[in-house]
Amino acid sequence: MKAEELFSLPDEFLFRSFFSPDDAPWEWIRKIKDSFDACGVSPNPDTFPSLSSGVVVDGPVYIDRSAKIGPNVVINGPAYIGPMTELRPGAFLRGNVIIGEACVVGNSSELKNCMLLNHVQVPHFNYVGDSILGNGVHLGAGVICSNLRLDRTKIPVKLPAGYVDSGLVKLGAMIGDETEVGCNAVLNPGTILGKRSLVYPCMSFGGYLDADAIAAPKQQEVRTIRRR
């Protein structure tokens, strides 16, 4: 499976040259830490936007001047916060975080070693660890991208042709462009959601979901949909 089947890198995306569309999507997660130096991202504390009270910035952090940073936000670098992105009160970025243009990271949401492309919303009490969220992805309140198995062994990735060893002990979700995940759903380690797919609220979902498909509770079958 190639990353381009899930994600379309925007032309203006600063990290575009480092993340190959031919890579397996989980390989992008391996690359996040190294992408900051490779793409020449430098901290810019002298040109940060006006920061609200209680904001803590530690380590190498780039914040676009058009970004909005709410009170009591904690940002541990390396981190990149793109244009017109909003970090709401109490958001916690734990390092190796890339956030694209016009995204929302909400109240008490926690991000770690992840990349959000453009127009992504993780607005309420979300955890996103070791994950890639494509353009226009929206997580409902309380959605968790779980990234560690209970037995702490390497995480297999389920594909249509069978399982592949990711080689990673920590691997969250790879969520394709324009996908919606309902409130309080849990995405199990190594989950892949195809473009424009939907996951019902309050589900524990793991494995692979086709593009334009719905993951519904057991009493309702997973079915293909057409999105306009």
Image: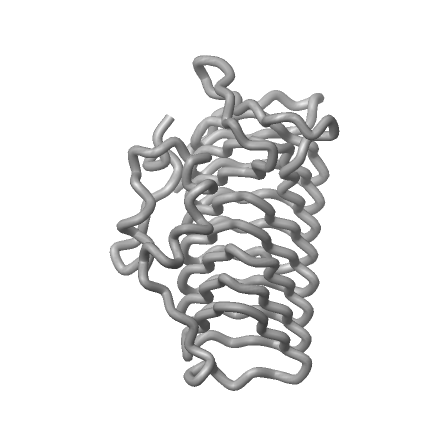
Q: Position of residue 36 (x, y in %)?
A: 40, 58
Q: What residue lies at 56% left-to-right and 31% top-to-bottom? A: 190
Report the residue at 51% width, 56% height from top.
97
Taking the image as shown, residue 14 lies to the left or right of residue 190, namely left
For this rendering, which residue is in front, 199 or 103?
A: 103
Above or below for 43 versus 180: below
Q: Is residue 125 left or right of residue 69?
A: right
Rendering quarter of residue 107: bottom right
Report the number of discs.
Answer: 0
Q: Is residue 146 left or right of residue 48?
A: right
Q: Examine the rendering and report whether any part of residue 94 can be seen.
A: yes
> Looking at the image, which residue is at 68% across and 80% down?
54
Q: Position of residue 184 (x, y in %)?
A: 71, 45
Q: Is residue 48 above or below residue 1?
A: below
Q: Nearer the viewer, residue 138 or 114?
A: 114
Task: Give residue 111's quadrant in the image.
Answer: bottom right
Query: Quick check: 34 above or below 72?
Result: above
Q: Nearer the viewer, residue 228 or 74?
A: 74
Instruction: From the top left corner, tell me how far across and down residue 191 is, in percent.
Output: 56, 31
**Screen quadrant of the C terminus:** top left
Could you tell me which residue is drawn at 50 percent across and 27 percent down? 166
Looking at the image, which is closer to me, 134 or 81? 81
Tell me if residue 136 can be seen. Answer: no
Report the colour scheme.
one colour
Split into 4 quadrants, where in the image is the N terminus? top left
**Left/right of residue 189 with respect to residue 86 in the rendered view:** right
